[in-house]
Every structure is written in structure tokens, then in C-alpha cells.
Amino acid sequence: MELIGIGLAIWILLGFVLASVIAMSCRGYGKATEMNPEFLAAMGFFWSILPPAMFGATSFFPWFNISVLAPFGFIGGLIPLLLIISIRGKKEGENALFGRDSQGRLSLFGCSPFEVVTTLLYGLLCFEIATIFLWDEFYRT
């Protein structure tokens, strides 16, 4: 089944939402490591978006069409997340995954509300930029 029009837009939007959640998780878990949380968030986001896009682009080459694997490409963003979890040590006072940390600050995916809003707006911007290139596909009659 070929995804066109609104179906493609919904598929891409859900992919960007998933990438934003993975980015926030990478940032939240990365705070207790020696690695840069912003770098980890960007890595988690783009490793979630680029593999499905590359798999999907192979549909233009009939001799190398592996576009059916595109939905599985989103798991690429889990690679930096698993790396962070594996090297993360036990630390006192770190943000909880959901709820509040030891100082009573609200957190979601280990991020403050400002970081959550920033990541979601960044994901929305990337989604809008991506849809510019699919204008013909979305509005084909």
C-alpha cells in the first residue's frame, strides 16, 4: 500500500512525535552522564527521522526498493538511548522519568517543562520543513 496525501502526513507526524519523545528521553537520561544532553537529544531525534526517510526514498529505485522497512527505521533513535542507559550510573537527586524530582520540580521524560516545550516546537518546525518537500504528494488530485 502506497502512502499518499493525508495518510502520508499522519505517518510523518507520528514519526516526528516519536522522535521528539526519544529526544526528550535522551536528554533526560543524559543529564546523569558525562555526555552533553543537547547533543544526545539531537542524536536521538535525527537517528529516529533519517533512517525511515532513507528507507522510504529507496522506493524511487525499483532495483533497490526496501521502503517496506521504513517504519522499522524509527528504532534507530533507540540506539543512543540504550547507550545512555547502559553507561548511566546511580546518582542521587536526578530527575524522575515522570512526576517530580527530589526538589519538587515537575519533569516529563526527565526534562523540565521548558525543555519539553522547546523539543516539541523544534520537532514541529522540522515537520513543517519536511512537509515543504512533500507538497505535491500531499495535495495531488
Image (cartoon, grey):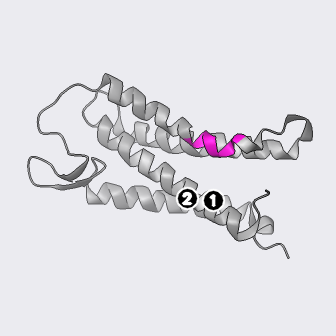
- Circle 2: element type: helix
Q: Are marks 2 and 1 in contact (CB under 8 Å)?
A: yes
Q: Quadrant of the C terminus?
A: bottom right
Q: Amino acid at mark 2?
A: Leu
Disc 2 crowd rating (10 Å Cα; few below 14, some 14-19, many 20+) is: few
Quadrant in the rendering for residue 106: bottom left
Task: Tell me if residue 87 comes above or below residue 108 in the rendering.
Answer: above
Task: Tell me if residue 33 comes above or below residue 55 in the rendering.
Answer: above
Task: Provide the residue designation for mark 1.
Answer: 11
Residues in magenta, as a range:
69-74
Judged by its main secondary structure, the magenta piece is helix
Rendered residue at 9%/46% (across/down): 102
Q: Amino acid at mark 1?
A: Trp
Give the image location of residue 67, x and y in percent. 76, 43
Give the image location of residue 35, x and y in percent. 34, 29
Rendered residue at 65%/58% (across/down): 130
> Separation of disc 2 and disc 1 at Cα?
5 Å
Rendered residue at 17%/39% (across/down): 94
Taking 126 as reference, is 139 left or right? right
Task: Provide the residue designation for mark 2.
Answer: 14
The one of 3 and 54 positioned closer to us in this rendering: 3
Residue 28 belongs to the span the image colors magenta: no
Q: Quadrant of the N terminus?
A: bottom right
Q: Residue furthest right?
A: 63
